Amino acid sequence: EGRWSLAGSTALVTGGSKGIGHAIVEELAMLGARVHTCSRNAAELEECRRRWEDKNLRVTVSVCDVSVRAEREKLMDTLRQTLGGKLDILVNNAGQSMVKAATECTGEDYALVMATNIESCFHLAQLAHPLLLRSAGGGASSVVHISSIAGFVGFPGLAVYSMTKGAMNQLTRSLAAEWAGDGIRVNCVAPGGINTDIAKDMDPEIVKSQATQLPMQRLGETEEVASVVAFLCMPAASYITGQVICVDGGRTIA
Ligand code: NDP
């Protein structure tokens, strides 16, 4: 068992059909993990599954809308079958942004973003706990949340989204403290602007001007987030828990 390997591990990554989640699935699988992932689009998931199979990566897929409690429960049932009830790694990545002035946000907007981004993380972590516990004997069990630098700094038009990301940062510290005795590490990766569909929804001129203002003067790539997630899951990171690591080209330190 290498300190820099995930060989023999099993992982659940939510929202793996696109963007950061897709890169995390590939990174974990390339490092030897068996991975299960989900999203809301069956056709896209199947397309991904086929491409992963062609690359000899061991990835299974199922449809799940993480904002719906009953679907989260069903996902964990599926997992018990596909991964044989053994789960070493949970990556809560699925999330959705909503760019809207705070004064314009409806009750439905608020409920949807909360359910998708934060309630899902808390509940999936709860549901995964017994499975992570079974794996924790080897000390290899861990949870990684994908929050955002929006959980640290204020961006206009992103109040509700940012609230969920701030909450993920705190959930990381709380669960890390509560589950350390169970041998389960809990960490968080907070990306800055990353080249995905989420960034494509924003005004390209704004994205460009934002990018040139940060120390590294560019958006990040999904692989640059995935590598940090993989590291946090490895035995090499065995003394790291409760941390929120920004992968942001220096945006929050400038
Ligand atoms: P993408 O939109 O590129 O991908 C999101 C993935 O999650 C897709 O696979 C999508 O599939 C899935 N997903 C979305 N909603 C749900 C849902 N309710 N249930 C199940 N799956 C869902 O987003 P990114 O890769 O950019 O974002 C991933 C995470 O990273 C998010 O939590 C985001 O907040 C965070 N992040 C992103 C940043 C960026 O600049 N890109 C910056 C900071 C944080 P489908 O829609 O088919 O369900």
Image (spheres, rainbow, N blue to C red):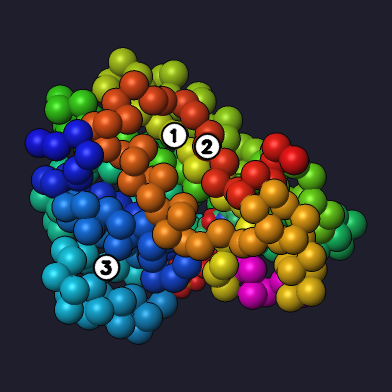
Relative placement, left or right, of 79 versus 93 is left
Which numbered disc, 2 or 3, marks the residue that appears first in the sequence?
3
Q: Label for residue 245?
A: 2
- The amino acid marked with disc number 3 is Val
Q: Position of residue 251 (x, y in %)?
A: 69, 46
- Residue neighbourhood size for the residue with mark 3, other residues' Cα within 10 Å, grouped as few (<14), some (14–19), many (≥20): many
What secondary structure is marked by label 2? strand
Relative placement, left or right, of 164 versus 23 is right
Q: Label for residue 115?
A: none
Q: CA distance from mark 2 to mark 3?
A: 28 Å
* Residue at disc 3, CB closer than 8 Å to ligand 1: no
* Residue furthest to the right: 103
Vertical relation: 64 (above or below) 42:
above
Q: In which quadrant of the rendered image does the C terminus lie?
A: top right
Q: Label for residue 187?
A: 1
- The amino acid marked with disc number 1 is Asn
Q: Position of residue 85 (x, y in %)?
A: 15, 46
- The amino acid marked with disc number 2 is Ile
Q: Which residue is mark 3?
A: 61
What secondary structure is marked by label 3? strand
Q: CA distance from mark 1 to mark 2?
A: 8 Å
Residue at 22 percent of width and 39 percent of height? 4
Relative placement, left or right, of 70 versus 217 is left
Q: Nearer the viewer, residue 250 or 234?
A: 250
Residue 86 magenta = no
* Residue furthest to the top: 181
**Residue stretch in magenta:** 198-203
Q: Position of residue 211 (x, y in %)?
A: 71, 61
